[in-house]
Every structure is written in structure tokens, then in C-alpha cells.
Amino acid sequence: MILHHMATWNFRNLAPGKVELGSGLNVIFGANGQGKTNLLEAIAVLGSLRSFRSHRYRPLLRHGERCLRLEGMLGSDSGPVALEVSWEVGPPPRRQLRLNGDSVHVSRYLQVFPVVVLAPGDRELVVGKPQGRRAYLDRLAFLLSRRHLDHLQRYRKLLDQRNAGLVRGVGGHEMAAWESQLAESAARIVLARRRVLERLEPRFQRIYHAIGGEGFPELRLEYQAEASLPPGDVEEALAEIYRKRYNDQRDRDRETGYTTAGPHRHDLMIRGTTGHVRDYLSAGQVKAVAAGLRLSFLEEVEEDRGEVLPLGIDDVDAEIDRAVTQRVLSLAAKGRQLVVTSTRAELGAWKDGSFRRHMVRDGSIQHVVGREESV
Amino acid sequence: MKELRPPAVRELLSHLERLPGVGPRSAQRLVEHLLTCPPDEPARLGEALISLRARVRLCSTCFLLTEEDPCPVCSDPGRDPSIILVVESPTTAWSVEATGEYSGLYHALLGHLSPLHGVGPEDLKIDELLRRVQGGGVREVILATNPTVEGETTALYIARRLEPLGLDISRPASGIPVGGEVGAVDQVTLAQALQLRRRV
């Protein structure tokens, strides 16, 4: 899968227009603050409808404008696809998604371009709040099975109803009905996430060990619920456990007005021999774990789709542990289209494949032919 | 800028735009039609609107819309009184009746459970359903609430309330529409249809 070109209008400081991308390595270079990362961010939003820098769309909009638009042309084994995202500030804010010119539902759109970007903010995936790791697992589960999004939406609705029921003091019989449905939904989500994690774990181990050097600790990925759950494909047993948990905790939950058990509180635990890794990993080790999570995610989707996918790497030559960066880059290549940002025009680690360079200056992106001095 | 729409047009537009599914554009089209169609058409529409609320009420037994109480279904000796089909809205019963496949009685709940909107069992016609069933003669209840989170929970809640009475309680099957293509069905429906597959 290749992103042939990317066009933006009113996206951050980028000058409006199209950037042609090569099928091998694309280096987006320029001094700090010129807009290198903005292009990578636009690619991420085009594919995943989410930025790796902001949870909201508003900051993506060029100052003083009211709507932004992104377009891309994707080439994949199943044929070319034109993607388009437009967003208006509103009120109410309005987002429109198109594939080959046809307006489509978000769940269909998100299946088309499963872009992955390695970014400095990825350390949050390792040491930050569980929410980011849940989103990581859920996105992978959704890319492998579209139904997961329906299950999540259903769970969310049921959770909102139970929480409203807690606050309004809804009676026991009615609460039991909501909890029974919520428990079934919870069981399905836990199972989907555990299945995904089971597939991911050996891949993660391989990549993490390839990236990591001497002295990198042994790690395990574990699904962590509020209390232990039986292993295996046991949907009905899990649903029964959650029915009981919701029932047992109802009185306590009424005090807080909030459901304390269930997949909305679970975590992907990255466990070392002495507990959670966030407490003792070095910055370089955190980076290696994050890269391991992102790359194993990418490989998992690639295996499912039967084709390699584009990969973005932001700030590829960041100062943190250059040896780790070099190993990440050589692992990442593997015939993929790469889009990387760098303050330098040349990448020492790059040995094979085609090479295309784009210089960014004050939001303008220019294809650079021939050798250029570093900026 | 001058206001070109005469006051009577503006007034009608403001009423039409309050109707569900009618936006400013379609309201404008409706007004245009009403001004150009034969003059007796709007007059008959007006009469129909007035008599709607004057004549139509809910059946005191099953809560379907009716002009006579009890409704034509409840008072029909040819219907099977041992089966009750429960729906959220009276208009759903119209669709079921149009199939020509159902000869039992109906019961409209007039909504579904939703703590988010403050709708509890006491706001629906659930106690009335229980009283009907306890009155005797009913052996089967079909819970045809909508296949939404709220509709399914409402069905589950009612099923549990009815459980001690030892009736047959069922939900209509969900699956692939007849005459449709298997590949065109959404994944949730398809997955459910596969789970509930039957031997041929």
C-alpha cells in the first residue's frame, strides 16, 4: 500500500496544495518549527482521523480559517482509492468523509488506510494513562474485525444507561436488566482485546528484542482487568462474572454515580520482572517498547491484509538513543513506504531502496532533486 | 434585505419546520405545493389535521391507536387471545399486521426504558401488560421491541417480570432481509444471522 500524494488546505501552517510521495523512503527535512511534522500529522489524520499530537481538530485548523480539507491518493492491492476528509468548525462542527468521491460512514472509512506513525509522543503509550493503551488495542481489534467498533459503541451506550440509572436511583429489577446486557457486551470486548493481545505478544517480543540492545529488560504484555478473569474463549462465563460484579458493586457504584468495573477501566499492562515498566525504564528503553508496540501493530495489520503498509516516523534523528533509532529504521524499512521527518537531509542508516527528499520551509514543501546540504 | 414571504406563508413554514424530518427546504416545497394544488386539497388536509386529534385515541387495553375503544383488534372475536405481541410504538403494529401472518393481540409500550432520558418502567405500559397476562388466557408473549440497546433491555426486563407466570416468551429473529444480498448486510446483522442459523 502506498500513499501516492497528499494534499492539504488550511491544515496548520502548511501551504495549500499537493505533495507527491515516493514509494520508498521519503525524508521531510527542514529546520525546527517549519512544519515537517505537520505533513506527517496530516497523513495520520487522513488515515486514522486522529492526530498523534492533538485529540481535537480545532488546533489543526490554520489560524483564522473555518474549514480544513485533506486529500490523498492511495494505491493498494485492491486498487486505487481517493480519500478525502473535510472538517468545518461549525457550530455544530461537521466532518465529511469520502472514498472515491462517495460519502461514507466512519467505520468504513477507517478500514481503508490503517496508517501507523512513530512519534516522540509515543512514550505516553508506555508510561501514560491506560486510556491510550486501550485505544491502541481497540484500534487493532477494529482493523482486524470491523464489528469491534459496533461492540464498543454498544458498550458505551449501555454504560451511559447504567451510570444514569445509578444516579437516578433506578430500581433493582431494571438495573439488573441493564447490567445483564452490559455484562454481555463487556465479555465480548474483553475477549476481542485478549485475542488481539495474544497474537501481538510474540511479534512484539521479536521486534522489541531486535530493537533493544544489551541490558534491555525482559517484558510481558498482559491484559489487566479490575480483578482476575478466567483465560480462554469463554464468553458466557465472562458475561456471568460481569453480571455478578455489576450486581455486587451496585450499591458502591451508586455512591459515585459511576461504573467501577469493566473494559472501560482495563489496561494493557507492560510488565517487567519487578512490576510495571513505567517505574524503571530508561528513556531509550521506553522508546524501544513504544516502537515495538507500533511496529508489531503494523505487522499484525499487514499480515491480515496481505500487503505492506506505509509507516511514518516523526523526528527520526531525535537525540534519544541513536542506536535504537537506527535499529528501528532498518526494521521499519522492509519494502514499506516510509515518510520520516528529520532536521537533516540525509539519513546515515538508509542503505537501500528509492529515496525522495522534500524540504519544508515556513509551511511550503518542495521536492528536492540532487544532493542538498543539511539545513 | 426585504422579507418577501407573506405572513401567512411564514406562519405555515414555522409550523411545518417543527415536524420531524422536515427542514426549511422541504417546508418550502410543501408550501409551494399547497399554493398551487387544487384548492380543495389544502382544505381537506386541514380538516384531517383537526379531526386527527379529536377522533384518535389509545385503546385502553392494548394502547394501539384507535377511534373506538376497545380497538378493532381487541374486539375481534376471530383473533387469538392467547398470544400478545409487544411493540414499542403503535405504528410498529401496523407493519406487523400488514404481513397478514399474525392473528394474535397486540400491546404497545409507548416507548422504551432509558435512564438517560428518565424513562422507567412506570412510564411505559408494562404494568398494564402484566395485568393483561395475569388476567388469564395468555400462553405466549412475543417481545417485538426494537433491536437497539434500549429495546433489547426493555424486552429483557419484561421477560424477567413475566418469567414467574410460566408463559412462552420469545423475540422475533434478526437476520438477512429476504430478497437481499448476503454480502450487502451489515456485519452485526450478518454475525447474528449466522449465530441464529437453522438447519435446512
Image (cartoon, rainbow, N blue to C red):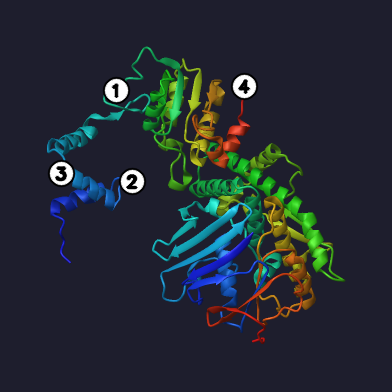
SS at mark 1 in the image: loop
Q: Chain ID for label 2?
A: B
**Residue A288 at x, y = what percent?**
76, 68
Q: Is residue A252 left or right of residue A282?
A: left
Task: Give the mark nearest the N terminus, 3 or 1.
Answer: 3
Q: Is residue A320 left or right of residue A131?
A: right
Q: Nearer the viewer, mark 2 or mark 4?
A: 4
Pick the front one: A16 or A357: A357
Q: Report the disc number at residue B200.
A: 4
Q: Is label 3 on the same chain as label 1?
A: yes
**Residue A311 at x, y = what percent?**
66, 65
Q: Which residue is rendered at x = 14% and y = 50% of the image?
A: B8
Q: Which residue is rendered at x = 61% and y = 43% of the image?
A: A185
Task: Give the mark nearest the N terminus, 1 or 2.
Answer: 2
Q: Nearer the viewer, mark 1 or mark 4?
A: 4
Task: Give the mark nearest the N terminus, 2 or 3.
Answer: 2
Separation of marks 2 and 3 at Cα, in angstroms = 23 Å
Pick the front one: A58 or B120: A58
Inspect this view and state whether residue A118 appears.
Answer: no
Q: Is label 2 on the same chain as label 4?
A: yes
Task: Give the mark nearest the N terminus, 1 or 4.
Answer: 1
Which residue, given by chain and number where applicable, does mark 3 sit on?
Answer: B36
Separation of marks 1 and 4 at Cα, in angstroms = 44 Å
Q: Amino acid at mark 1?
A: Asp
Which residue, given by chain and number where applicable, does mark 2 sit on?
Answer: B21
Q: Amino acid at mark 3?
A: Thr
Q: Quadrant of residue A355?
A: bottom right
Q: Amino acid at mark 2?
A: Gly
**Residue A12 at x, y = what percent?**
50, 74
Which residue, given by chain and number where applicable, does mark 1 sit on?
Answer: B69
SS at mark 4 in the image: loop
Q: Is label 2 on the same chain as label 3?
A: yes
